Image (cartoon, grey):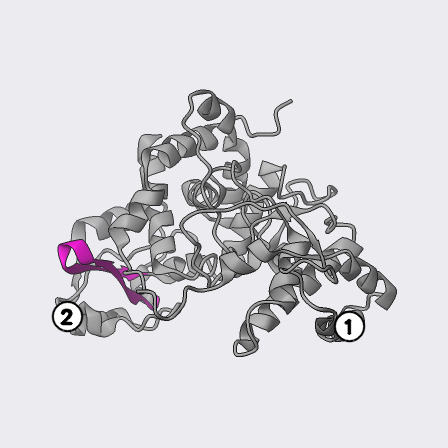
């Protein structure tokens, strides 16, 4: 039996599948992915003599970390130490995560370029096939959690091309590298983030939910079809069959329900449109705060010059009596179009900002929304 979903097999046969790079730190991300993925399965021992390997003097933070994990997670110290002793340093991981030198020109944010990467024919056709192949699980997720089937499909399509590209780095090695040997001490927040994820991975391993010695994923440690970080697996992953072990790498039903559960736990409102049916004011840029939380009342948007799109509003309100979006806080987002010397502005509902908790990017959440719409229309 093929290890790939029935959705992927016909695409492979037609030569339509290409390896798409998975987002770093999905399901709690704040890191933008590089343009291309690079695989490197070489593994340098922690105390090895390779020029890329850390020196023995760097082991003290690891020892302190092991003690803290043992105390905070209630795991025998020997088990933590044993697992960490098997972790390896991955120079490729450190290189991929390292930002470009300050003297290099910063890339310009371009919504059109980003959109073309993800809202495109391969993912749309793949999304239709995915929806058909996994209709039962998707409908179950929508029934239980209230998340539209096409939104779940779009997230999985953008993350891993419907399970085709899940990453080939050993997660234990990746998180070990990022927790202790990247980033530099001037970013203690990043150190804590990756150390927490490594602790979550250890806890999952000890509980028998993941084999940390063999589990593979992205260079940032994201795992499986939905690219969940270990912490997200601990808190949001669910089993389609409650008596079975959760498997996000092979079980599409588990992945589908877990994506829906993640969104609901972050505040998804059933029936609420992702974008409000509103035309932003001409000076909408003044309302963009760049944050990931809606903060504007409809009365404030209207006072600033926003106008209601009546036809869209009426259409939304007619379907299954959805909640009135005007009762919720909104947020104006910006989508730069530098080649056209303009910026596209949209008004996001709480559901838009929920999607940004999966990957902390206006571009990402908008691409998910538009891919979902394209898949639904193609159905």
Of labels 2 and 1, earlier in sequence is 1
Q: Residue 43 location in percent, x, y?
A: 68, 51
The image shows residue 161, relative to residue 285, as above or below, that is above
Q: Is residue 359 above or below residue 39?
A: below
Residue drawn where x is 52% and y is 36% of the image: 164
Labelled disc at residue 283: 2
Residue 302 visible in rendering: yes
Residue closer to the observer: 265 or 318: 265
Mark 2 crowdedness (10 Å alpha carbons): few <14, some 14-19, many ≥20: few
Q: Locate residue 127: give its quadrant.
A: top left
The answer to whether residue 273 is seen in the rendering is: no
Please report contact status of discs 2 and 1: CB closer than 8 Å, yes or no. Answer: no
x and y percentages locating residue 97 in the rendered image: 50, 60
Disc 2 to disc 1, C-alpha distance: 54 Å
Is 292 left, or right, of 303 in this rendering? right
The residue at 47%/25% (across/down) is: 12
Residue at 23%, 60% in the rendered image: 336
For mark 1, what is the residue? 63
Under tag 2, what secondary structure? Answer: loop
Q: Main secondary structure of the magenta part?
A: strand
- Give residue 347's quadrant in the image: bottom left
- Quadrant where the C terminus sits is top left
Compare residues 102 and 24 and report the one nearer the observer.
Answer: 102
In the image, which residues are magenta?
Answer: 328-348
Q: Whole-percent x and y of residue 228? A: 57, 52
In reply to whether residue 346 is colored magenta, the answer given is yes
Disc 2 vs disc 1: which is toward the camera? 1
Apparent side of residue 319 relative to residue 93 in the rendered image (left or right): left
Please count the marks in the image: 2
Residue closest to the eye, 46 or 205: 46
């Amino acid at each position: 039996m093929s290890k790939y979903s029935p959705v992927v097999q016909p695409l492979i046969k037609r030569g339509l599948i290409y390896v798409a790079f998975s987002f770093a730190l999905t399901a709690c991300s704040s890191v933008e992915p590089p343009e291309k993925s690079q695989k490197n399965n070489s593994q340098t021992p922690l105390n090895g003599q390779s020029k890329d390997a850390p020196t023995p003097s760097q082991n003290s933070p690891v020892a302190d970390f092991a003690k803290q994990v043992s105390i905070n997670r209630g795991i025998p110290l020997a088990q933590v130490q044993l697992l960490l002793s098997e972790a390896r340093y991955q120079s490729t991981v450190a290189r991929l995560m390292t930002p470009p030198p300050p003297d290099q020109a910063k890339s310009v944010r371009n919504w059109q370029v980003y959109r073309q990467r993800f809202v495109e024919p391969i993912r749309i056709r793949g999304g239709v096939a995915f929806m058909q192949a996994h209709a039962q699980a998707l409908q179950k997720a929508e029934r239980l959690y209230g998340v539209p089937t096409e939104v779940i499909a779009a997230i999985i399509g953008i993350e891993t091309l419907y399970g085709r590209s899940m990453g080939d780095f050993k997660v234990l090695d990746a998180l070990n590298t990022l927790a202790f040997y990247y980033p530099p001490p001037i970013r203690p927040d990043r150190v804590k983030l990756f150390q927490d994820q490594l602790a979550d991975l250890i806890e999952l391993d000890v509980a028998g939910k993941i084999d940390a010695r063999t589990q593979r994923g992205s260079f940032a440690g994201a795992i499986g079809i939905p690219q969940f970080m270990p912490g997200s697996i601990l808190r949001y992953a669910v089993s389609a069959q409650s008596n079975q072990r959760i498997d996000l790498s092979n079980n599409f039903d588990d992945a589908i329900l877990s994506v829906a559960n993640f969104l609901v736990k972050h505040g998804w409102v059933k029936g609420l449109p992702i974008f409000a049916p509103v035309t932003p004011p001409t000076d909408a840029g003044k309302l963009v705060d760049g944050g990931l939380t809606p903060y504007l009342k409809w009365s404030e948007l209207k006072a600033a010059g926003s106008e209601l799109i009546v036809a869209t509003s009426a259409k939304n309100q007619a379907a299954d009596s959805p909640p009135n979006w005007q009762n919720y806080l909104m947020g104006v987002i910006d989508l730069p179009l530098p080649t056209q010397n303009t910026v596209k502005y949209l008004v996001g509902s709480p559901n838009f900002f929920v999607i940004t908790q999966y990957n902390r990017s206006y571009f990402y959440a908008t691409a998910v929304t538009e891919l979902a719409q394209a898949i639904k229309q193609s159905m």
